[in-house]
Amino acid sequence: MAKVRIGTIDDLAEGQTVRVDANGRPLLLSRFDGQFFSVDAICSHAGGRLEDGDFQGRCVTCPIHSAVFDLTTGKAHPETDWAPDLESFPVIAEGVELFVEIGTETGVSAASNSSAPLSSGTCQFAAAAAGIDFDPMSEEQRECPFDVYRKARESLPVFYNERFDLWVVTRYDDIVRILKDPATFSSAQSLSVDATVPVEVQAVLDTGYPPTPTMVTADPPVHTRFRELVGRAFTSRRIALIEPRMREIANQLVDGFVERGRADIVRQFAYPFPMEVIAEILGVPTGDMDRFKRWSDDMSARFGPLPLERQLECARSEVEFQHYFAAQLEERRSHPQRDFLTDLLNARVEGERPLDMPELLSVLKQLLIGGNETSTNLIGSAMFWLMNNPEQLQAVLNDRTRIANAVEETLRLDSPVQGLFRTTTREVEIGGVRLPKGAHLELLYASANRDERRFRDPDRFDVFRTDSSNHMAFGFGIHFCIGAQLARSEGRIALETLLNRLPNPRLADGQRIEHHSHFFLRGLKQLEIEWDAIH
């Protein structure tokens, strides 16, 4: 056990709870009757950030699935005992200083420092040696990567991929352990397969603003600061307030094609719907939507391997995006409005300085991509799975309350984000495999979501499944997707609107189902749907 300083007695008033970080592990620190208590700050059931939940008395309610936990013991309330208890930690007061006793290992074990890192030439965990040809950029795996995922889970759940110099983790429990230990598994390169930038591409990027780590690409305490700033715009209460406007946007889009009896749901609905919603949230003109979409597609494409010409094109898009939003922010600085951009300019955390322009643009880049790609791919995939499973579609049509679970099943079975990356800060062992310091990992959320050890009959689309929402489509732990509530609401409203407005919807005959080429994002290029004529 290690003793870690987490603050002072004066940091907490009686009855107050705050989030603290202990060697990178997020904890909730509470004070009741003059005593101090500490429990995990991440929900043991769904990975939600408990500091975003509701606090009543000595209990906190998870903002995702309403599991209730005792802040003094970490135990789940009897009415929500389906959630495992939180781990609790002794708090020690020495004078005015507060310390917590926390284990040096969090489900992963440190390897001996005397052991040499494994090379691709000698690695016994190399994918090729086990017959696992992991290549997300290949046409076959672009359309169906799940057989490769299953083979890896069964035979080599943590493997080294020589092609991309990447360690890949495929099982649910191993990924949870990693995400609970941000001190050992850094998010500094969480969106990159390869951090190398060609000089020609860097020359283009240099005409814009420098990159800076903020949310997805940062570790505590930097991550914590930005998360708190941006999280205020995506609380469940604020999402509920904009739901009428989201429904209005969805119905206006359907108005544009409902009388035709056929539409490409991806191009005509799934792409413009979340883009218009995020444009409303950011407070920017919806007339610039086509540019937003191009910027989003190009910036997200840079996360994977690309030929040089495409890299240059994407870099030019990113610079264009930066200059556009820098001008929008400067306009808000001179003429404040009641919108997110103005709020972001005025945001302060505990008296700290405001965000500078590179930080502001980094936040907006992540929001634009996250607010577009995930929801677009979710909506298209949800319609595909419902149309392709008539009995499940009929169950949803008979009971519209199952739409929310259809969204969760789509997120589990066909995750829009197949996985993200981490880098080890020390030698460590995970899943029986020793990883060297500096190892680059991909955590395959999509494989975890089909892990037979976690989900029954995992390859089946089932709107009656009771544990669908335990998926990892939004990650887990301190980096749990800040826009998860928005994406879920958009998915639910999209399905409600489409199923209410389109009678007897079905897949159009003769179409070819294809997915976009991307290293870790998954979404349909198009999806033609037909429905009965409306008289």
Image (cartoon, helix red, strand yellow):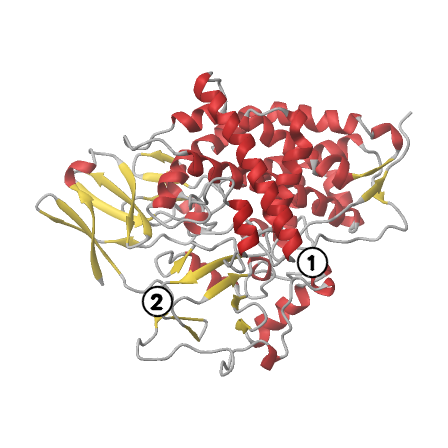
Q: CA distance from mark 2 to mark 1?
A: 39 Å
Q: Residues within 10 Å of mark 1 (few under 14, many from 20)?
A: few
User: In this orientation, which residue lies closer to the viewer: 303 or 506?
Assistant: 303
Tally the numbered discs.
Answer: 2
- Horizontal and vertical percent for residue 422? 46, 59
First in residue order: circle 2 vs circle 1: 2
SS at circle 2: loop
Q: Is residue 404 left or right of residue 268?
A: left
User: In this orientation, which residue lies closer to the viewer: 190 or 391?
Assistant: 190
> Image height check: is 82 above or below 265?
below
Please state, as top left, top right, bottom left or bottom right, where the C terminus lies in the image. Answer: top right
The residue to which callout 1 is attached is 460
- Horizontal and vertical percent for residue 308? 63, 56
- Horizontal and vertical percent for residue 280? 59, 26
Question: Which residue shows up at 44% across the image and 75% down it?
Answer: 432
User: In this orientation, which residue lies closer to the viewer: 38 or 376?
Assistant: 376
The residue to which callout 2 is attached is 426
Residue 322, visible in the rendered structure: yes
> Image height check: is 241 above or below 458?
above
Mark 2 or 1, closer to the camera:
2
Residue 504, quarter of picture:
top right
Please state, as top left, top right, bottom left or bottom right, where the N terminus lies in the image. Answer: bottom left
Q: Is residue 358 left or right of residue 249?
A: left
Residue 32, quarter of picture:
top left
> Image height check: is 168 above or below 52?
below
